[in-house]
Image (cartoon, grey):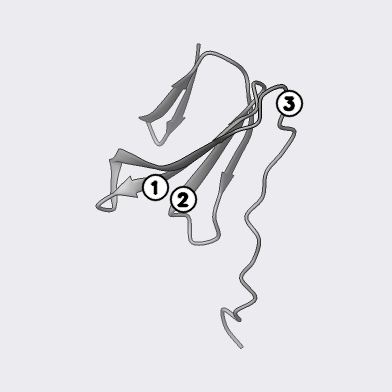
């Protein structure tokens, strides 16, 4: 069993190997992908670090997820 922990708080427990952990640019959302082809998107619940909410999941049976990335939305952050 593999447990994803951020800053000493458990987000998710997983029975297969995790292959990708990615934070979005603002650091609000965490994407977790594994060797079984499962992808989960997590967010802080009410902006509390020790309380997580699963925003969505996707399953790609038979696919070994090698990596993941959040795409930039194209908006300029600063000049």
Pointer 3 residue: 64
Of circles 1 and 3, which is in front?
3
Residue 29 got which mark? 2
Answer with left or right where residue 7 lies relative to residue 60.
Answer: left
| Label 2 Cα neighbours within 10 Å, binned few <14 / some 14-19 / many ≥20 | some
Judged from this view, the residue extending furthest toward the bottom is 79
Disc 1 on helix, strand or loop? strand
Task: Tell me what residue is drawn at x 50 percent, y 11 percent.
Answer: 1
Q: CA distance from mark 1 to mark 2?
A: 5 Å
User: Does 63 sit above or below residue 70?
Assistant: above
Answer with left or right where residue 32 lies relative to residue 63.
Answer: left
User: Does 68 sit above or below residue 38?
Assistant: below
Disc 3 on helix, strand or loop? loop
Q: CA distance from mark 3 to mark 2?
A: 22 Å
Q: Position of residue 22 (x, y in %)?
A: 59, 44
Of circles 3 and 2, which is in front?
3
Task: Tell me what residue is drawn at x 72 percent, y 22 percent.
Answer: 62
Pointer 1 residue: 43
Q: Position of residue 4 (x, y in %)?
A: 47, 27
Disc 2 on helix, strand or loop? strand
Q: Position of residue 71 (x, y in %)?
A: 66, 60
Answer with left or right where residue 38 lies relative to residue 51.
Answer: right
Task: Tell me what residue is drawn at x 28 percent, y 53 percent.
Answer: 47
| Label 3 Cα neighbours within 10 Å, binned few <14 / some 14-19 / many ≥20 | some
Task: Tell me what residue is drawn at x 62 percent, y 55 percent.
Answer: 70
| Label 1 Cα neighbours within 10 Å, binned few <14 / some 14-19 / many ≥20 | many
Q: Earlier in the sequence, mark 1 or mark 3?
A: 1
Q: Earlier in the sequence, mark 1 or mark 2?
A: 2
Q: Work out whether residue 78 or residue 16 is closer to the camera in this orientation and state it.
A: 16
User: Does 67 sit above or below residue 24?
Assistant: above
């Amino acid at each position: 069993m593999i447990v994803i922990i951020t800053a000493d708080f458990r987000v998710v427990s997983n029975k297969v190997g995790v292959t990708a952990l990615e934070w979005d640019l603002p650091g609000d959302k965490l994407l977790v992908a594994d060797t079984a082809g499962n992808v989960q998107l997590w967010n802080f619940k009410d902006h509390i670090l020790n309380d997580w909410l699963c925003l969505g999941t996707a399953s790609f049976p038979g696919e070994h997820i090698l990596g993941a990335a959040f795409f930039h939305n194209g908006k300029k952050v600063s000049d």
